[in-house]
Image (cartoon, grey):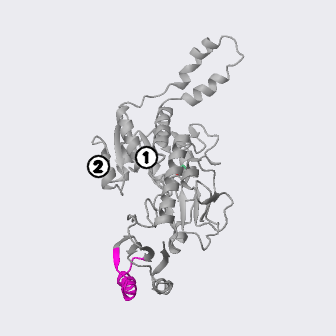
Amino acid sequence: MMNILKLNAISPVADGVFKGYDYSDSAKDPEGIILRSFQMHDYPLGDNLLAVARAGAGVNNIPVDKCTERGIVVFNTPGANANAVKELVLCELFLGGRKIVDGANWAQTLKGQDGISKLVEKGKGKFVGQEISGKTLGVIGLGAIGAMVADAALWLGMDVVGYDPFLTVRNALVLDRRVQVVKELSEVFKQCDFITVHVPLTPDTKGMFDKKSLAACKDGVVIINNSRGELVVSSDMAEAVANGKVSRYITDFPDETLLGKENILCVPHLGASTPEAEDNCAYMAAKQLVDYLENGNITNSVNFPAVSMPRTSAARVCVHHKNIKEILSKILSIVSSQGINVAHMQDQSKGEYAYLILDLDDVPSAASLDLIKSIEGVLRVRKI
Ligand code: MLT
């Protein structure tokens, strides 16, 4: 029986998928780990560990590079919480335009006073806001969430400018043709009244909103960040809000600098906190993990390529390897020297790394698997 360790509370929809596994928050020497935002960077990666499944999109809490070097597959669940995040962004677009939160907080202060309705009519002038219809929204990152936000904003009467240097053909095809896709991020800063960001945190995106980029924005821009706090330099943002360059900053990532400041609305990381999103993410993460543990198939991994084949033959051998010259022929020559026929194979690369599934007509010997393991550039070999 294989062990699956959960490092966060995971929706019970995963329980059914993990039937037959020892699945708990105390599983020892696990082959699989499932988690949400647990900080795994200092967590030991045991020798048995084959895969880590993130029930969510962001993987900045997982030591992805360390996992890759050891042939540990890291999965995430792109799109599974996209609707929940889209709905929060829509809510925040309205909150960015209108002073609803400030006004509602002020209304609470009227409790116990005489003539509340008169006080309301007298005081409401401080909370006048703007409509979003007819304004221009910039969507940075046109993946599952960004594309849904762009589409919904168009239906709310906004003009939409999109930016994504890694726009996939699939996402480009589903994107509404009315979205004006620009090649330079500076175009988003220049044109947009509202900006929402939907990119992962990477060394390239860290600090994307700093003094310089904020200065390039339109005066009075509203900025919404439900991706990761570190995309924004908080002190630069606080300064831009204080001097009115940014009329409102709304973020899912409160920090000491941002809290308690006028026109900065801090939401406690609620983007994916709906039962629907938690169920979708848990189910998708669990399915991907089980398909990998049982069949070696990879879908939605952030560190290894997508490779999947139906099981048809006597034995399956899966090899994680570096994407280097001649390695494939070395592996295949070991298999053929055993007199074993390769029924089907697939090898795909992702940057410096690659993954091979070999379906064989006979079961290879342990010695031949050891020989494959000893090839320079091979990270892990698994017979299923
Ligand atoms: C995500 O990365 O999927 C969201 O930030 C929600 C979460 O952390 O679970």
Q: Residue at left 62%, top 66%?
A: 30
Query: What residue type is disc 2 on?
Result: Leu
Q: Judge: label 2 CB < 8 Å from ligand 1.
A: no
Residue that carries the numbered disc 1 in the rendered image: 145
Query: Relative to 113, does residue 41 appear above or below in the rendering?
Result: below
Which residues are drawn in magenta? 322-343
Task: Answer with left or right where residue 282 lies relative to residue 158.
Answer: right
Residue that carries the numbered disc 2 in the rendered image: 173
Picture quadrant of residue 364: bottom left
Task: Answer with left or right where residue 367 lies relative to residue 133.
Answer: right
- Residue found at the very far bottom of the displayed protein: 337
Q: Residue at left 39%, top 40%?
A: 137
Percent across and percent down for residue 163 are 36, 50
Q: Earlier in the sequence, mark 1 or mark 2?
A: 1
Find the distance from the CA under tag 1 to the CA under tag 2. Answer: 15 Å
Q: Is residue 228 magenta?
A: no
Picture quadrant of residue 24: bottom right
Q: Quadrant of the N terminus?
A: bottom right
Secondary structure, mark 1, is helix
Query: Relative to 40, does residue 86 appear above or below in the rendering?
Result: above
Q: Judge the density around disc 1: few (<14), some (14-19), many (≥20) Cα neighbours within 10 Å.
A: many
Residue 125: which numbered mark, if any? none
Q: Is residue 338 magenta?
A: yes
**Which of the pair 265/34 is nearer the observer?**
34
Q: Residue at left 47%, top 84%?
A: 365
Percent across and percent down for residue 83 are 46, 41
> Is residue 78 something that shows in the picture?
yes
